[in-house]
Image (cartoon, rainbow, N blue to C red):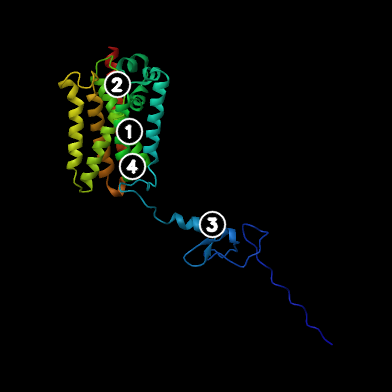
Amino acid sequence: MTSQPSQPSETVPTCYRHNDRETWVRCQRCNRPICPDCMQNASVGFQCPECVAQGNKSVRQARSTFGGAVVAKPVVTYTILGLIALMFAGQYLTNDRLTAELAMNPLAVVGLGQYYRLITSAFLHFGFIHILFNGYALWAIGPYLERAFGHWRFAALYLLSALGGSTLAYWLDAPNTWSVGASGAVYGLFAAVFVVGRKLNMDVRGVVVLIAINLAITFLPWIIPGVFGGTMLSWTAHLGGLATGAVVSAALAYAPKKSRSLVQVAAIVGVLAVLVILVAIRSAQFSL
């Protein structure tokens, strides 16, 4: 009686990431064994997590209309609205002490070196009508612009418009004038809607009418004293924000595709630099 020599059993492969898991499935790209937890669906079969990640790097990511990352939710708009609401509650709860600490006032800015007021004032408001108007305008057009530009570009547009409004107020308002409100930033967004509409060949007549009406309202208290109970609207902040928003949004919308990000960043930094220089020159004039 004879016997055949026993054949060595084939070694069962184990997952390259989990050595204790047997598997006969291999990555279609690198041929490494992968367990069910490591299997990633591919066009054919499965791939391992590393190959999927490597493949994603070569896939062109979707971009917004003007080069930003695609926006699923306008989180910057909602964050700004939330900050405005919190600041308004703080004004009420502190009996306007918060207003005195953060509102725009040329003398406080230069005399005390409180340059943060140029921005913080854009998150404060005088009364419910004031905050409702600005809040509604931001809620209505903010998401549209944030989706067009992307998160950080929209944030830069908003903050620079606010700073542009405060800068013009710093130059032209009476030294001890107190002003608050997101109106400067909102007017900058109005200008951006017009610029985007023109770039996309849309009918912008409605936007022009909206801007004209709001500018008329801005100057109405100067024409009819007492029309708003003696409250004067800051025409300097409105015009400064409108002009700044127009410049920034034009740079974002009309930047050439081949060097879009570079041009957009350079424009944003350039506008910021100009505003900072203007504030510095005005401060120097105050100290003379």
Proximity of marks 1 and 3: CB atoms separated by less than 8 Å: no
- Label 1 – label 4 distance at C-alpha: 12 Å
Three-letter code, disc 1: Gly
Q: Disc 3 or 4, which lies upstream in sequence?
A: 3
Give me the residue at 36% from left, 27% from top.
123
Q: Disc 2 or 3, which lies upstream in sequence?
A: 3
Report if residue 273 is visible in the image.
no
> Number of marks in the image?
4
- For disc 4, the marked residue is 143
Three-letter code, disc 3: Pro
Label placed on residue 49: 3
- The secondary element bearing badge 3 is classed as helix
* Residue 122 in the image, given as x and y percentages of width and height: 33, 27
Q: Callout 4 environment at 10 Å: few (<14), some (14 to 19), or many (20+)?
A: many
- For disc 1, the marked residue is 135
- Label 3 – label 4 distance at C-alpha: 35 Å
Three-letter code, disc 4: Pro
Q: Disc 1 or 2, which lies upstream in sequence?
A: 1
* Quarter of the N terminus within the rendering: bottom right
Three-letter code, disc 2: Ser
- Label 1 – label 2 distance at C-alpha: 17 Å
- Between 50 and 184, the one nearer to me in the picture: 184
- For disc 2, the marked residue is 179
- The secondary element bearing badge 1 is classed as helix
* Quarter of the C terminus within the rendering: top left
Quarter-wise, where is residue 68 in the image? top left
- The secondary element bearing badge 2 is classed as loop
Proximity of marks 1 and 4: CB atoms separated by less than 8 Å: no
Q: Disc 4 or 2, which lies upstream in sequence?
A: 4
Q: Callout 2 environment at 10 Å: few (<14), some (14 to 19), or many (20+)?
A: many
- Label 2 – label 3 distance at C-alpha: 55 Å
* Residue 141 in the image, given as x and y percentages of width and height: 29, 40
